[in-house]
Image (spheres, grey):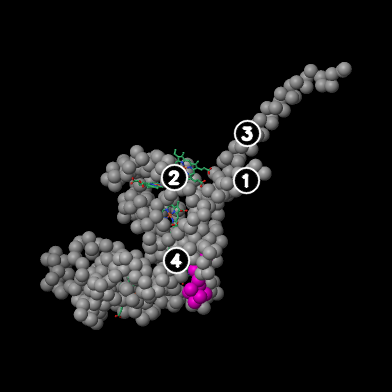
Amino acid sequence: MAQVFPRSANWASKASILAALLIVASILGVVLNINRIDYVSMVGVAIDQPVHFSHKHHVTGMGIDCRYCHTTVEVSAFAGVPPTETCMTCHSQIWTEAPILEPVRASFRDNKAIEWNRVHDLPDFVYFNHSIHVSQGIGCQSCHGQVDQMPLMMKAHTLNMEWCLDCHRDPAQFIRPRDQVFNMNYEYPANQETLGKSLVADYDVQTSQLTNCSICHR
Amino acid sequence: MLASSGCELRQAMYNQEKYEPLEASAFFDDGLSFRNQVTGTVARGQMMLDTHYYQGMVDGQLASTLPVTVSQELLERGQERFNIFCSPCHDQTGSGNGMIVKRGLKQPPSFHQQRLRDIPVGHFYDVITNGFGVMYSYASRIPVEDRWAIAAYIKVLQLSQNVEFDQLPAEDQRQLQ
């Protein structure tokens, strides 16, 4: 029987095997790295909320401290989202007719919590704790970015494991004096490398354990 | 098929059958997974028998002394908490011209008027705990210990704004002359 494919077709078939492998590899590459693409991990994407609460307006415009609303951030794992009562300490008197605040008033009247959409949400198999970070000199800004400039809340970082580890391997890059944790405009000094190292020592940060799996997966 | 079952497994681990703090619940009528304490019950540690400490009252009168020891630390804590929770309206000096007042909130009285300078320290504890007029209570946001720290700090603020000339350090006296 006559040969269907000429000898030169060997080349084409080898090339197509290679191409198929490349395609599979790149699909895998996309799938495995998809969480690193900002849009997929929602970095920098403002999340819509039942009330258009603006951190920019309340924090920068009026100088309200994070702890006025996120009262448990220094003492518990959970920073906490303020109850409607907190809004009403001011909004029982300010902009009492504004339609934009109607959901807040309704929530207070009917004693029904406002259902804020979560912006940061780690998988349930990861353990995270605010109080240790705050008490060891890690600023809100290091993890949440310029909250004071956000009209609507958005993520500033992916919050994936690689990101946590980048700091846990060497916290001296990001650590700051404790009294600067809530400062949204802190500027790292030129000698951060030396200052960071001495703060890590002063605050007795246990750098040797910080990359153990069991720290975050307990 | 394979891919989708993989995703479901993944989702199950990402969002496990447990409530995180403040997560919504479909089980309870009010939609809260966090259960409020049942009215009329007293949990451990909630027996507030010490009226001086918990209510700012001694023998049915506003306490004129602090139930905690005054220290530099207590006052610094008081200053920090005052600046977080009170200064938006009362401003950092306590004169009642905070940022929120400038945006239309009722102006609170200055802490430096005679009536409030003469009032027992228990009054400040009481106002933080129970609110006053249009001012809301801060009991759910400020723990008891911190309320006393703030009350003590307000007393210090009052003194600082009303120093007699001959009580000033010599250096300041010279500058004023």
Q: Nearer the viewer, mark 3 or mark 2?
A: 2
Q: Nearer the viewer, residue A7 or A217?
A: A217
What residue is drawn where x is 46% and y is 70%?
Answer: A84
- Verify whether residue B16 appears in magenta: no
N-terminal of the pair, mark 4 or mark 1, is 1
Identify the element where label 4 is drawn: loop
Q: Chain of mark 4?
A: B
Q: x%, y% of residue A108?
A: 48, 74
Which disc number belongs to residue B5? Answer: 1
The amino acid type found where label 1 is placed reads: Ser
* Bounds of the magenta segment: A106-115
Above/below status of A99 relative to B145: below
Above/below status of A105 relative to A190: below
The amino acid type found where label 2 is placed reads: His
Q: Are marks 4 and 2 on the same chain?
A: no
Which disc number belongs to residue B35? Answer: 4
| Mark 4 → mark 2, Cα distance in angstroms | 27 Å
Q: x%, y% of residue A164?
A: 44, 45
Q: x%, y% of residue A18?
A: 68, 27
On the rendered structure, is A51 left or right of A28? left
Rate crowding at label 2 as few (under 14), some (14 to 19) or many (20 or more) other CA atoms within 10 Å.
few
- Residue at the farthest right position: A1
| Mark 4 → mark 1, Cα distance in angstroms | 34 Å
Kindly indicate the quadrant of the structure image that contains residue A192.
Answer: top left
Identify the element where label 2 is drawn: loop
| Mark 1 → mark 2, Cα distance in angstroms | 24 Å
